[in-house]
Amino acid sequence: MRLKNKVAIITGGTSGIGKATTLRFAEEGANLVVTGRRSGLGKVVEAECRQRGGQCLFVEADHTKAEDCQRVVDSALREFGRIDILFNNAGIVTKGTADTTSENVWRETLEINVTAVWRMCSLVIPQMKKQGGGVIVNNGSDWSVVAGKNALPYIVSKGAVGMMTKAMAIDYARDNIRVNAVCPGDTFVDRWMEKGYFEGSDPVTLEEAIREASDYIPMGRFGKPEEIANAVLFLASDESAFVTGHLLLVDGGNTAQ
Ligand SMILES: NC(=O)c1ccc[n+]([C@@H]2O[C@H](COP(=O)([O-])OP(=O)(O)OC[C@H]3O[C@@H](n4cnc5c(N)ncnc54)[C@H](OP(=O)(O)O)[C@@H]3O)[C@@H](O)[C@H]2O)c1
């Protein structure tokens, strides 16, 4: 029960890494506020948390909208009276090079992957200061530290998440607010089978994913959402009490090459 009596906001908890982290946190005793735009899936997550003995409130929200972000924070305070942990997880994965990325895709990517992260931090930090501290974990990527092909807007956004994490860690260290990022390598989530790896690409079957991963990832497989959730749990819990400004790569050795 590493998060017993802690209140955590998890953005984008309706699927993938956000959902796995929500369920992991519920098992560790956290009280949860989970967000996303797909309310049907949000209600399922709420119910699954309760089955694990955790308290969970789903708040339908689009984090590109300032008023929705404010509503999430207000709901957390109304329901649980405090905010100890913020996991900024909501994000989209977009592709394109400098000359093939449209203005719309560029803006959409930065809005949710960067601006929304800053916005949620700006709303939660004053409350954490009042409480005497808190923990923020941002979801970066292995592309927070290295680049790759044909994903310019996404790579720029995740690079920014990395530097935002370090800058905020320095700004708020004396307020007892730790700020770290989990940086997953390719992690097999349902979205890949529904929509493909990138927004607008072809769906990927499990067999294709297994074949592809064995080519380029030293460990020969993609990550599992639960493995990323465990790393987030470490960064969110007191076990990482002296860790701040850190980008924790969880990538099967991909960036070691
Ligand atoms: N899977 C990977 O290989 C991988 C690798 C590195 C980093 N990541 C990062 O992990 C995070 C989660 O992605 P995932 O792989 O778990 O995929 P996912 O299942 O598609 O999860 C994305 C989550 O973000 C939410 N979201 C997206 N736009 C939103 C918006 N405007 N407002 C509110 N919520 C929004 C989605 O909820 P709704 O659709 O319900 O709004 C969903 O819950 C992302 O930041 C991604 O960049 C993933």
Image (cartoon, grey):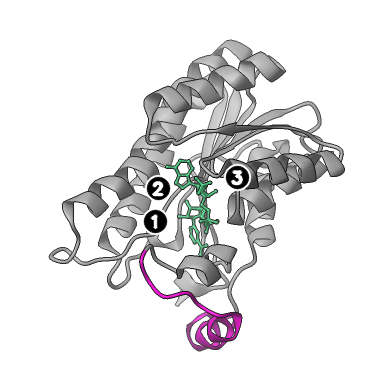
Label 3 within 8 A of ligand 1 by Cβ: yes
> Badge 2 local density, few (<14 within 10 Å), some, or many (20+)?
many
Q: Is residue 205 above or below residue 26?
A: below
> Which SS class for mark 1?
helix
Residue 138 showing in the rendered view? yes
Give left or right: position of 143 versus 194. left
Give left or right: position of 108 versus 253. left
> Which SS class for mark 3?
loop
Type of amino acid under label 2: Gly
Q: Is residue 143 above or below residue 50?
A: below
- Please provide the residue range marked out in magenta: 200-220
Of residue 255 and residue 210, the one placed in the foreground of this image is: 210
Type of amino acid under label 3: Gly
Q: Which residue is mark 1?
A: 144
Give left or right: position of 253 versus 25. left
> Which SS class for mark 2?
helix
Q: Which residue is mark 2?
A: 162
Q: Which residue is mark 3?
A: 13
* Residue found 45% across the figure and 27% down from its top: 68
Q: Are marks 1 and 3 in contact (CB under 8 Å)?
A: no
> Badge 3 local density, few (<14 within 10 Å), some, or many (20+)?
many
* Residue found 26% across the figure and 62% down from its top: 152
Q: CA distance from mark 3 to mark 2?
A: 21 Å
Label 1 within 8 A of ligand 1 by Cβ: no
Q: Is residue 62 magenta?
A: no
Quadrant of the rendered image containing residue 83: top right
Q: Are marks 1 and 2 in contact (CB under 8 Å)?
A: yes
| Spot occupied by residue 131 in the image (x, y as percentages of width and height) | 62, 14
